[in-house]
Image: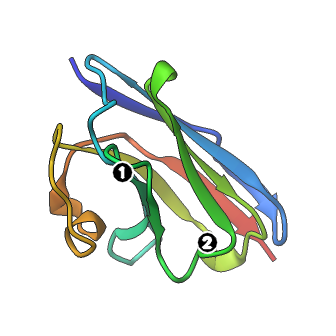
């Protein structure tokens, strides 16, 4: 059974940092694009960042550029999201997602939920002002 399990969320003051982890099990995701999305109360789930399997290139939403960094450790079948300079508007449930194996992405498709086949349950991040 494929599982993605996020961890590392919590309560932090504005300007602080958190590192989210996503551990995958049930199959290897070495050949899958891995992404992070978030959903704030009353809002739709939105793209945060992705790291591709083919080149290791990363892409992120404009709202987090320069503050968030996505990385992966294929040996551990894991992906991470380092979040610095956190703002209250970053408060949300953060979800890890994995794309289909060896999928060919476009800059548009990797930003939409339908591109991803597997999802974690989410981890809450709360940033106080």
Spatial distance from mark 1 to mark 2, Cα to Cα? 23 Å
Residue closest to the far front = 55
Front residue of 76/36: it is 76
Q: Which mark is in front, 1 or 2? A: 1
Residue 60 lies, with reference to residue 4, above or below; the image says: below
Q: Quadrant of the C terminus?
A: bottom right
Q: What residue is at 45 percent from the left and 27 percent from the top?
A: 74
Q: Earlier in the sequence, mark 1 or mark 2?
A: 1
Residue 34 lies, with reference to residue 58, above or below; the image says: above
Q: What residue is at 38 percent from the left and 78 percent from the top?
A: 43
Dot 1 lies on which element?
loop
Q: Is residue 90 left or right of residue 129?
A: left
Dividing the picture into quarters, in which one does residue 26 lie?
top left
Q: Quadrant of the N terminus?
A: top left
For label 1, count other residues whose C-alpha is less than 10 Å away and answer few (under 14), some (14-19) or many (20+).
Answer: many
Q: What residue is at 32 percent from the left and 74 percent from the top?
A: 44
Indicate the position of residue 69 as horizontal and vertical percent values: 62, 58
For label 2, count other residues whose C-alpha is less than 10 Å away and answer few (under 14), some (14-19) or many (20+).
Answer: many
Q: How is the protein colored in the picture?
A: rainbow
Q: Is residue 116 left or right of residue 37?
A: left
Indicate the position of residue 71 as horizontal and vertical percent values: 55, 46
Front residue of 110/25: it is 110
Indicate the position of residue 88 as horizontal and vertical percent values: 70, 76
Numbered tag placed on residue 125 in the rendering: none
Disc 2: which residue: 90
Disc 1: which residue: 52
Dot 2 lies on which element?
helix
Indicate the position of residue 92 as horizontal and vertical percent values: 53, 64
């Amino acid at each position: 059974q494929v599982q993605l399990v996020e961890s590392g969320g919590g309560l932090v003051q504005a300007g602080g940092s958190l590192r989210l982890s996503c551990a995958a099990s049930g199959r290897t995701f070495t050949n899958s694009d891995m992404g992070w999305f978030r959903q704030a109360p009353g809002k739709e789930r939105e793209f945060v960042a992705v790291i591709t399997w083919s080149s290791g290139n990363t892409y992120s939403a404009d709202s987090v550029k320069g503050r968030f960094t996505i990385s992966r450790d294929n040996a551990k079948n894991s992906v991470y999201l380092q979040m610095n300079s956190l703002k209250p508007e970053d408060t949300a449930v953060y979800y890890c997602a994995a794309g289909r194996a060896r999928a060919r992405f476009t800059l548009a498709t990797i930003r939409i939920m339908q591109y991803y086949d597997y999802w974690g349950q989410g981890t809450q991040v709360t940033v106080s002002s």
